[in-house]
Amino acid sequence: MPSVEAAGLAQVAPEDEDEPEEILWNLGFVEKPEKPQLLLRHRFPSKVGGRPAWLDPVRLPSLEMLTCRASGRLLDFLLQVYAPVDANPVEGFHRCLFLFISPEGSRLREPGAVRLFRCQLPRHNPYYSSEPPSNKDKYPQLLKPSDADASRERDPWRSVDAERPLTAVSTSSSPSSVKRRKEAAAAAAPADAATTAAAELAGGVPGDGDRSGTASTTAAAAAPLPRTGLRGPGGLYLELELIVEPEDDYMDEEGEEEVTSQARRPGPVAGGPGERRGGEEEGHGDGGAVEGGDGGVEAEVRRALQQYRARVAEEGELDDEELPPDVLEAVEDATAPEQRCFVDFQARVSWAPDQVIRYCFQDGAQPLWPAPHGRPGPGDIPPCPCCGAPRKMEFQVMPQLLHYLQLDEDDPASPDWSTLVAYTCAASCSPPAGTECAYLEEVVWVQSPAP
Protein backbone atom coordinates (compact mmCIF):
# COMPACT_ATOMS: atom_id res chain seq x y z
CA MET A 1 0.00 0.00 0.00
CA PRO A 2 1.32 3.50 -0.77
CA SER A 3 2.77 5.29 2.22
CA VAL A 4 0.26 7.53 3.96
CA GLU A 5 1.20 10.64 5.87
CA ALA A 6 -1.30 12.70 7.84
CA ALA A 7 -3.97 10.11 7.17
CA GLY A 8 -7.48 11.39 7.69
CA LEU A 9 -6.68 15.09 7.33
CA ALA A 10 -8.10 15.20 3.85
CA GLN A 11 -9.81 12.73 1.61
CA VAL A 12 -10.64 12.33 -2.01
CA ALA A 13 -14.27 11.93 -2.96
CA PRO A 14 -15.62 8.52 -1.87
CA GLU A 15 -15.18 6.01 -4.67
CA ASP A 16 -18.83 4.87 -4.54
CA GLU A 17 -20.15 8.30 -5.48
CA ASP A 18 -21.55 8.69 -8.98
CA GLU A 19 -19.43 10.73 -11.35
CA PRO A 20 -21.13 13.97 -12.47
CA GLU A 21 -22.44 13.87 -16.02
CA GLU A 22 -20.49 16.97 -17.05
CA ILE A 23 -17.12 15.28 -16.47
CA LEU A 24 -15.06 15.30 -19.67
CA TRP A 25 -12.19 12.87 -20.07
CA ASN A 26 -9.14 12.99 -22.31
CA LEU A 27 -7.52 9.78 -23.52
CA GLY A 28 -3.84 9.24 -24.20
CA PHE A 29 -2.59 6.98 -27.00
CA VAL A 30 1.02 6.10 -27.79
CA GLU A 31 2.67 6.47 -31.18
CA LYS A 32 6.22 6.22 -32.38
CA PRO A 33 7.49 9.82 -32.70
CA GLU A 34 8.11 11.10 -36.21
CA LYS A 35 11.29 12.80 -34.99
CA PRO A 36 12.94 12.25 -31.56
CA GLN A 37 13.61 16.01 -31.35
CA LEU A 38 9.86 16.60 -31.01
CA LEU A 39 10.03 14.98 -27.57
CA LEU A 40 12.73 17.28 -26.19
CA ARG A 41 11.86 19.47 -23.22
CA HIS A 42 11.41 22.76 -25.12
CA ARG A 43 8.48 21.13 -26.96
CA PHE A 44 6.78 20.40 -23.62
CA PRO A 45 6.01 16.81 -24.61
CA SER A 46 3.79 14.16 -23.12
CA LYS A 47 5.58 10.87 -23.62
CA VAL A 48 6.36 7.37 -22.43
CA GLY A 49 9.86 6.03 -21.85
CA GLY A 50 13.22 7.31 -22.98
CA ARG A 51 14.92 9.84 -20.74
CA PRO A 52 12.91 12.39 -18.74
CA ALA A 53 12.40 15.64 -20.65
CA TRP A 54 12.74 17.68 -17.45
CA LEU A 55 10.64 20.85 -17.32
CA ASP A 56 13.04 22.60 -14.96
CA PRO A 57 16.36 21.14 -16.15
CA VAL A 58 18.44 22.46 -13.24
CA ARG A 59 16.54 22.21 -9.94
CA LEU A 60 15.98 18.49 -10.36
CA PRO A 61 14.77 15.89 -7.85
CA SER A 62 17.43 14.63 -5.48
CA LEU A 63 18.88 11.15 -5.74
CA GLU A 64 16.80 10.14 -2.71
CA MET A 65 13.63 11.23 -4.49
CA LEU A 66 14.59 9.19 -7.56
CA THR A 67 15.26 6.06 -5.50
CA CYS A 68 12.78 3.24 -5.01
CA ARG A 69 12.11 3.01 -1.28
CA ALA A 70 11.25 -0.68 -1.58
CA SER A 71 14.41 -1.87 -3.33
CA GLY A 72 16.87 0.95 -2.72
CA ARG A 73 17.60 1.09 -6.46
CA LEU A 74 17.26 3.91 -8.96
CA LEU A 75 13.71 4.22 -10.25
CA ASP A 76 12.84 3.63 -13.90
CA PHE A 77 11.30 6.57 -15.77
CA LEU A 78 7.89 5.49 -17.07
CA LEU A 79 6.15 8.57 -18.49
CA GLN A 80 5.42 12.28 -18.27
CA VAL A 81 2.27 14.28 -18.92
CA TYR A 82 2.32 17.98 -19.82
CA ALA A 83 -0.81 19.32 -18.12
CA PRO A 84 -1.30 23.02 -17.28
CA VAL A 85 -4.43 23.59 -15.16
CA ASP A 86 -6.56 26.58 -14.18
CA ALA A 87 -5.82 26.10 -10.46
CA ASN A 88 -2.55 28.07 -10.71
CA PRO A 89 -2.35 29.64 -14.18
CA VAL A 90 0.43 32.15 -13.42
CA GLU A 91 3.01 30.08 -11.57
CA GLY A 92 1.90 26.96 -13.43
CA PHE A 93 1.82 28.32 -16.98
CA HIS A 94 3.99 25.30 -17.79
CA ARG A 95 3.19 22.22 -15.72
CA CYS A 96 4.33 18.63 -16.07
CA LEU A 97 3.92 15.39 -14.12
CA PHE A 98 6.68 12.75 -14.08
CA LEU A 99 5.96 9.13 -13.14
CA PHE A 100 8.67 6.68 -12.07
CA ILE A 101 8.39 3.02 -11.10
CA SER A 102 10.60 0.48 -9.35
CA PRO A 103 12.95 -1.61 -11.51
CA GLU A 104 11.59 -4.58 -9.54
CA GLY A 105 8.13 -4.84 -11.04
CA SER A 106 6.81 -7.34 -8.51
CA ARG A 107 7.18 -4.72 -5.74
CA LEU A 108 5.10 -1.89 -7.19
CA ARG A 109 2.54 -2.17 -4.40
CA GLU A 110 5.15 -1.50 -1.72
CA PRO A 111 5.56 2.01 -0.29
CA GLY A 112 7.72 4.26 -2.42
CA ALA A 113 8.00 1.85 -5.38
CA VAL A 114 5.96 4.17 -7.63
CA ARG A 115 6.65 7.90 -7.31
CA LEU A 116 5.16 10.94 -9.01
CA PHE A 117 6.70 14.43 -9.21
CA ARG A 118 5.04 17.66 -10.31
CA CYS A 119 6.95 20.63 -11.70
CA GLN A 120 5.67 23.97 -12.96
CA LEU A 121 7.10 27.23 -14.26
CA PRO A 122 5.71 30.69 -15.06
CA ARG A 123 5.58 31.85 -18.65
CA HIS A 124 8.66 34.01 -18.16
CA ASN A 125 11.43 31.78 -16.85
CA PRO A 126 15.19 31.25 -17.40
CA TYR A 127 14.85 28.17 -19.62
CA TYR A 128 12.22 28.82 -22.29
CA SER A 129 11.00 31.61 -24.51
CA SER A 130 7.67 33.15 -23.58
CA GLU A 131 6.50 32.30 -27.10
CA PRO A 132 5.90 28.79 -28.46
CA PRO A 133 8.88 27.18 -30.23
CA SER A 134 8.99 27.48 -33.99
CA ASN A 135 9.85 24.77 -36.47
CA LYS A 136 13.39 26.10 -36.55
CA ASP A 137 13.85 25.52 -32.82
CA LYS A 138 15.05 21.93 -33.04
CA TYR A 139 16.81 21.90 -29.69
CA PRO A 140 16.40 23.62 -26.31
CA GLN A 141 18.41 26.74 -25.69
CA LEU A 142 21.81 26.03 -24.17
CA LEU A 143 22.07 26.14 -20.41
CA LYS A 144 24.75 28.19 -18.75
CA PRO A 145 27.81 26.01 -18.05
CA SER A 146 27.18 26.18 -14.31
CA ASP A 147 23.53 25.15 -14.79
CA ALA A 148 24.52 22.34 -17.14
CA ASP A 149 26.96 21.02 -14.55
CA ALA A 150 24.30 21.28 -11.84
CA SER A 151 21.91 19.30 -14.03
CA ARG A 152 24.48 16.56 -14.67
CA GLU A 153 25.22 16.39 -10.97
CA ARG A 154 21.61 15.49 -10.12
CA ASP A 155 20.35 13.70 -13.23
CA PRO A 156 21.23 9.98 -13.54
CA TRP A 157 19.88 10.02 -17.12
CA ARG A 158 22.16 12.89 -18.30
CA SER A 159 19.24 14.36 -20.22
CA VAL A 160 20.95 17.72 -20.70
CA ASP A 161 23.71 16.01 -22.70
CA ALA A 162 21.39 13.80 -24.73
CA GLU A 163 19.15 16.66 -25.89
CA ARG A 164 21.60 18.33 -28.28
CA PRO A 165 23.80 17.45 -31.27
CA LEU A 166 26.91 15.77 -29.92
CA THR A 167 29.24 18.59 -31.04
CA ALA A 168 27.09 21.34 -29.53
CA VAL A 169 26.59 20.16 -25.95
CA SER A 170 27.16 22.84 -23.35
CA THR A 171 30.17 21.83 -21.27
CA SER A 172 32.19 23.45 -18.57
CA SER A 173 35.96 23.73 -18.79
CA SER A 174 36.45 23.60 -15.03
CA PRO A 175 38.79 20.75 -13.92
CA SER A 176 36.14 19.27 -11.65
CA SER A 177 33.53 19.09 -14.41
CA VAL A 178 36.04 17.56 -16.84
CA LYS A 179 36.89 14.93 -14.24
CA ARG A 180 33.20 14.15 -13.68
CA ARG A 181 32.62 13.72 -17.41
CA LYS A 182 35.63 11.40 -17.74
CA GLU A 183 34.40 9.29 -14.83
CA ALA A 184 30.92 9.14 -16.36
CA ALA A 185 32.40 8.12 -19.70
CA ALA A 186 34.42 5.32 -18.08
CA ALA A 187 31.40 4.06 -16.16
CA ALA A 188 29.22 4.07 -19.25
CA ALA A 189 31.80 2.63 -21.65
CA PRO A 190 30.29 -0.90 -21.77
CA ALA A 191 26.86 0.51 -22.62
CA ASP A 192 27.35 0.69 -26.39
CA ALA A 193 23.61 0.52 -27.00
CA ALA A 194 23.05 3.44 -24.67
CA THR A 195 25.70 5.50 -26.43
CA THR A 196 24.14 4.71 -29.79
CA ALA A 197 20.71 5.72 -28.52
CA ALA A 198 22.10 9.00 -27.23
CA ALA A 199 23.65 9.72 -30.60
CA GLU A 200 20.44 8.93 -32.46
CA LEU A 201 18.38 11.10 -30.12
CA ALA A 202 20.71 14.02 -30.61
CA GLY A 203 20.78 13.61 -34.38
CA GLY A 204 24.42 12.48 -34.53
CA VAL A 205 26.02 9.44 -36.09
CA PRO A 206 27.75 6.92 -33.79
CA GLY A 207 31.48 6.87 -34.34
CA ASP A 208 31.47 10.26 -36.03
CA GLY A 209 32.53 12.27 -33.00
CA ASP A 210 36.29 11.94 -33.12
CA ARG A 211 37.02 15.22 -34.88
CA SER A 212 37.42 17.19 -31.68
CA GLY A 213 37.59 14.40 -29.10
CA THR A 214 34.60 15.95 -27.32
CA ALA A 215 31.59 14.31 -28.91
CA SER A 216 32.41 10.72 -27.99
CA THR A 217 32.99 11.70 -24.37
CA THR A 218 29.71 13.60 -24.32
CA ALA A 219 27.82 10.65 -25.79
CA ALA A 220 29.14 8.37 -23.07
CA ALA A 221 28.33 10.95 -20.40
CA ALA A 222 24.77 11.06 -21.73
CA ALA A 223 24.27 7.37 -21.03
CA PRO A 224 22.32 6.48 -17.88
CA LEU A 225 24.15 5.06 -14.91
CA PRO A 226 24.85 1.33 -15.31
CA ARG A 227 22.18 -0.93 -13.83
CA THR A 228 20.93 -4.48 -14.14
CA GLY A 229 17.73 -5.77 -15.71
CA LEU A 230 17.97 -3.50 -18.74
CA ARG A 231 14.64 -2.64 -20.41
CA GLY A 232 16.24 -1.55 -23.66
CA PRO A 233 19.09 0.73 -24.77
CA GLY A 234 20.66 2.09 -21.59
CA GLY A 235 17.99 0.53 -19.38
CA LEU A 236 15.26 2.79 -20.75
CA TYR A 237 11.71 1.96 -21.69
CA LEU A 238 10.80 2.34 -25.35
CA GLU A 239 10.24 6.04 -26.08
CA LEU A 240 6.78 6.82 -27.46
CA GLU A 241 4.79 10.01 -27.90
CA LEU A 242 1.54 10.43 -25.95
CA ILE A 243 -1.22 11.77 -28.19
CA VAL A 244 -4.20 13.16 -26.27
CA GLU A 245 -7.73 13.21 -27.65
CA PRO A 246 -11.17 13.78 -26.05
CA GLU A 247 -13.02 10.63 -25.11
CA ASP A 248 -16.19 12.14 -26.58
CA ASP A 249 -14.63 11.85 -30.02
CA TYR A 250 -14.89 8.09 -29.61
CA MET A 251 -18.08 7.76 -27.58
CA ASP A 252 -20.20 9.97 -29.85
CA GLU A 253 -19.17 8.44 -33.14
CA GLU A 254 -20.58 5.21 -34.53
CA GLY A 255 -20.04 2.96 -37.51
CA GLU A 256 -17.48 3.99 -40.06
CA GLU A 257 -15.85 6.70 -38.01
CA GLU A 258 -15.23 4.33 -35.12
CA VAL A 259 -13.79 1.68 -37.41
CA THR A 260 -11.55 4.30 -38.99
CA SER A 261 -10.20 5.50 -35.65
CA GLN A 262 -9.44 1.97 -34.52
CA ALA A 263 -7.73 1.15 -37.80
CA ARG A 264 -5.61 4.26 -37.34
CA ARG A 265 -4.56 3.09 -33.87
CA PRO A 266 -4.19 -0.70 -33.93
CA GLY A 267 -3.75 -1.88 -30.40
CA PRO A 268 -4.76 -4.36 -27.73
CA VAL A 269 -7.88 -4.65 -25.67
CA ALA A 270 -7.22 -4.68 -21.96
CA GLY A 271 -7.01 -8.11 -20.41
CA GLY A 272 -8.84 -9.30 -17.32
CA PRO A 273 -7.83 -8.19 -13.83
CA GLY A 274 -5.64 -11.26 -13.42
CA GLU A 275 -3.83 -11.09 -16.77
CA ARG A 276 -0.27 -9.83 -17.03
CA ARG A 277 -0.58 -8.01 -20.32
CA GLY A 278 -2.82 -5.81 -22.39
CA GLY A 279 -5.04 -8.49 -23.92
CA GLU A 280 -5.56 -10.19 -27.25
CA GLU A 281 -6.11 -8.99 -30.77
CA GLU A 282 -9.63 -10.33 -31.19
CA GLY A 283 -12.60 -8.52 -29.72
CA HIS A 284 -11.75 -4.94 -30.73
CA GLY A 285 -15.31 -4.15 -31.66
CA ASP A 286 -16.95 -5.24 -28.43
CA GLY A 287 -14.31 -4.78 -25.79
CA GLY A 288 -12.98 -8.33 -25.92
CA ALA A 289 -14.02 -11.54 -24.23
CA VAL A 290 -14.19 -11.87 -20.48
CA GLU A 291 -11.98 -14.67 -19.29
CA GLY A 292 -13.26 -17.55 -17.24
CA GLY A 293 -16.25 -18.66 -19.33
CA ASP A 294 -17.16 -20.77 -22.29
CA GLY A 295 -18.06 -19.45 -25.74
CA GLY A 296 -21.76 -19.11 -24.90
CA VAL A 297 -21.05 -17.02 -21.81
CA GLU A 298 -18.68 -14.77 -23.74
CA ALA A 299 -21.28 -14.29 -26.46
CA GLU A 300 -23.84 -13.25 -23.86
CA VAL A 301 -21.44 -10.74 -22.35
CA ARG A 302 -20.64 -9.33 -25.80
CA ARG A 303 -24.33 -9.00 -26.55
CA ALA A 304 -24.85 -7.22 -23.23
CA LEU A 305 -21.96 -4.85 -23.95
CA GLN A 306 -23.31 -4.00 -27.37
CA GLN A 307 -26.70 -3.13 -25.91
CA TYR A 308 -25.04 -1.12 -23.17
CA ARG A 309 -23.05 0.89 -25.72
CA ALA A 310 -26.13 1.52 -27.81
CA ARG A 311 -27.94 2.91 -24.77
CA VAL A 312 -24.94 5.06 -23.80
CA ALA A 313 -24.75 6.51 -27.31
CA GLU A 314 -28.43 7.41 -27.18
CA GLU A 315 -28.96 8.42 -23.55
CA GLY A 316 -25.54 9.07 -22.07
CA GLU A 317 -23.75 7.16 -19.30
CA LEU A 318 -25.98 4.74 -17.37
CA ASP A 319 -25.77 3.37 -13.86
CA ASP A 320 -26.79 -0.13 -12.82
CA GLU A 321 -30.34 0.90 -11.96
CA GLU A 322 -30.89 2.28 -15.48
CA LEU A 323 -29.56 -0.73 -17.36
CA PRO A 324 -32.23 -2.83 -19.07
CA PRO A 325 -33.06 -5.79 -16.80
CA ASP A 326 -32.16 -8.37 -19.44
CA VAL A 327 -28.76 -6.74 -20.01
CA LEU A 328 -28.00 -6.51 -16.30
CA GLU A 329 -29.15 -10.09 -15.72
CA ALA A 330 -27.03 -11.38 -18.61
CA VAL A 331 -23.96 -9.64 -17.26
CA GLU A 332 -24.50 -10.81 -13.69
CA ASP A 333 -25.24 -14.39 -14.69
CA ALA A 334 -22.30 -14.61 -17.07
CA THR A 335 -19.60 -13.26 -14.78
CA ALA A 336 -18.18 -13.94 -11.36
CA PRO A 337 -18.38 -11.10 -8.78
CA GLU A 338 -14.76 -10.05 -9.46
CA GLN A 339 -15.49 -9.87 -13.19
CA ARG A 340 -18.65 -7.77 -12.97
CA CYS A 341 -16.58 -4.69 -12.26
CA PHE A 342 -14.35 -5.59 -15.17
CA VAL A 343 -17.33 -5.84 -17.53
CA ASP A 344 -18.19 -2.21 -16.72
CA PHE A 345 -14.53 -1.33 -17.22
CA GLN A 346 -14.47 -3.06 -20.61
CA ALA A 347 -17.71 -1.42 -21.69
CA ARG A 348 -16.16 2.02 -21.21
CA VAL A 349 -12.75 1.12 -22.58
CA SER A 350 -14.17 -0.63 -25.65
CA TRP A 351 -14.86 2.73 -27.31
CA ALA A 352 -11.08 3.23 -27.62
CA PRO A 353 -9.43 -0.08 -26.69
CA ASP A 354 -5.83 1.09 -27.06
CA GLN A 355 -6.00 4.02 -24.63
CA VAL A 356 -3.09 4.01 -22.19
CA ILE A 357 -3.94 7.14 -20.17
CA ARG A 358 -7.21 8.57 -18.89
CA TYR A 359 -6.88 12.23 -17.83
CA CYS A 360 -9.29 14.57 -16.06
CA PHE A 361 -8.61 17.29 -13.46
CA GLN A 362 -12.26 18.22 -12.94
CA ASP A 363 -13.84 18.01 -9.50
CA GLY A 364 -15.70 14.75 -9.03
CA ALA A 365 -13.77 12.75 -11.64
CA GLN A 366 -13.47 9.10 -10.59
CA PRO A 367 -10.95 6.51 -11.77
CA LEU A 368 -12.17 3.74 -14.01
CA TRP A 369 -11.32 0.75 -11.83
CA PRO A 370 -10.70 -2.59 -13.57
CA ALA A 371 -11.43 -4.49 -10.34
CA PRO A 372 -13.26 -3.90 -7.05
CA HIS A 373 -10.30 -4.81 -4.85
CA GLY A 374 -7.41 -2.59 -3.76
CA ARG A 375 -9.07 0.82 -3.97
CA PRO A 376 -8.16 3.71 -1.64
CA GLY A 377 -10.32 4.16 1.41
CA PRO A 378 -11.07 7.21 3.56
CA GLY A 379 -7.83 8.90 4.58
CA ASP A 380 -5.61 6.90 2.22
CA ILE A 381 -4.87 9.92 0.01
CA PRO A 382 -3.19 12.55 2.22
CA PRO A 383 -3.41 16.31 1.59
CA CYS A 384 -0.62 18.27 -0.04
CA PRO A 385 2.13 18.67 2.58
CA CYS A 386 3.25 21.93 0.94
CA CYS A 387 -0.01 23.92 1.12
CA GLY A 388 -2.49 21.64 2.90
CA ALA A 389 -4.97 21.49 0.01
CA PRO A 390 -6.66 18.15 -0.64
CA ARG A 391 -5.41 16.01 -3.47
CA LYS A 392 -7.68 14.88 -6.27
CA MET A 393 -7.40 12.35 -9.03
CA GLU A 394 -5.73 13.74 -12.16
CA PHE A 395 -4.92 10.80 -14.39
CA GLN A 396 -4.66 7.03 -14.44
CA VAL A 397 -2.36 4.70 -16.33
CA MET A 398 -4.21 1.85 -17.99
CA PRO A 399 -3.00 -1.77 -18.18
CA GLN A 400 -2.86 -1.46 -21.98
CA LEU A 401 0.43 0.45 -21.63
CA LEU A 402 2.15 -2.78 -20.58
CA HIS A 403 1.61 -4.11 -24.11
CA TYR A 404 3.32 -1.14 -25.74
CA LEU A 405 6.36 -1.30 -23.45
CA GLN A 406 7.34 -4.56 -25.19
CA LEU A 407 8.39 -6.21 -21.96
CA ASP A 408 9.83 -9.66 -21.46
CA GLU A 409 6.94 -11.57 -19.92
CA ASP A 410 9.32 -14.18 -18.54
CA ASP A 411 11.28 -11.55 -16.62
CA PRO A 412 10.05 -11.56 -12.99
CA ALA A 413 11.17 -7.92 -12.72
CA SER A 414 8.72 -6.80 -15.42
CA PRO A 415 6.08 -4.44 -13.99
CA ASP A 416 2.39 -5.28 -13.82
CA TRP A 417 -0.67 -3.38 -12.65
CA SER A 418 -4.42 -3.14 -13.01
CA THR A 419 -4.15 0.64 -12.97
CA LEU A 420 -1.94 3.40 -11.54
CA VAL A 421 -3.95 6.41 -10.32
CA ALA A 422 -2.23 9.78 -9.83
CA TYR A 423 -3.56 12.16 -7.17
CA THR A 424 -2.23 15.73 -7.17
CA CYS A 425 -2.63 18.95 -5.18
CA ALA A 426 -6.00 20.50 -6.02
CA ALA A 427 -4.42 23.97 -5.78
CA SER A 428 -1.40 23.01 -7.89
CA CYS A 429 0.81 24.91 -5.47
CA SER A 430 4.43 25.81 -6.13
CA PRO A 431 7.45 25.05 -3.91
CA PRO A 432 8.46 27.83 -1.51
CA ALA A 433 10.69 30.48 -3.06
CA GLY A 434 14.38 29.68 -2.96
CA THR A 435 14.02 25.92 -2.59
CA GLU A 436 16.72 23.79 -4.17
CA CYS A 437 14.25 21.44 -5.91
CA ALA A 438 11.46 22.56 -8.25
CA TYR A 439 9.68 19.19 -8.11
CA LEU A 440 7.00 18.32 -5.55
CA GLU A 441 6.11 14.71 -4.85
CA GLU A 442 2.49 13.69 -5.28
CA VAL A 443 0.66 10.39 -4.61
CA VAL A 444 0.13 7.35 -6.83
CA TRP A 445 -2.30 4.62 -5.91
CA VAL A 446 -1.34 1.21 -7.27
CA GLN A 447 -4.11 -1.29 -7.96
CA SER A 448 -2.42 -4.62 -8.48
CA PRO A 449 -3.85 -7.41 -10.63
CA ALA A 450 -6.04 -9.92 -8.83
CA PRO A 451 -4.00 -12.78 -7.36
Image: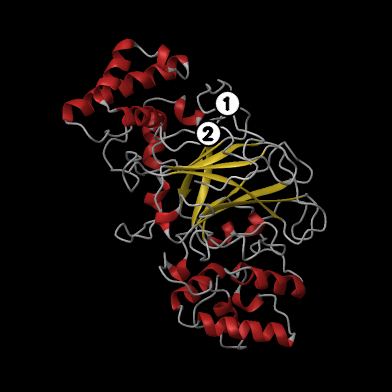
**Residue ID for mark 1:** 23
At label 2, counting other C-alpha atoms closer than 10 Å, the crowd grade (few under 14, some 14-19, many 20 or more) is: few
Q: Quadrant of residue 275?
A: top left
Q: Amino acid at mark 2?
A: Gly
Image position, residue 118 (x, y; %): 65, 50
Q: Relative to the observer, which residue lies in front, 35 or 237?
A: 237
Q: Is residue 43 above or below residue 371?
A: below
Q: CA distance from mark 1 to mark 2?
A: 22 Å
Q: Is residue 200 above or below residue 240?
A: below
Image position, residue 345 (x, y; %): 40, 31
**Residue ID for mark 2:** 377
Q: Evaluate whether residue 286 shows in this view.
A: no
Q: Residue at x 32, y 43 (%)?
A: 451
Q: Residue at x 27, y 18 (%)?
A: 330
Q: Evaluate whether residue 157 shows in this view.
A: yes
Q: Relative to the observer, which residue lies in front, 185 or 319?
A: 319
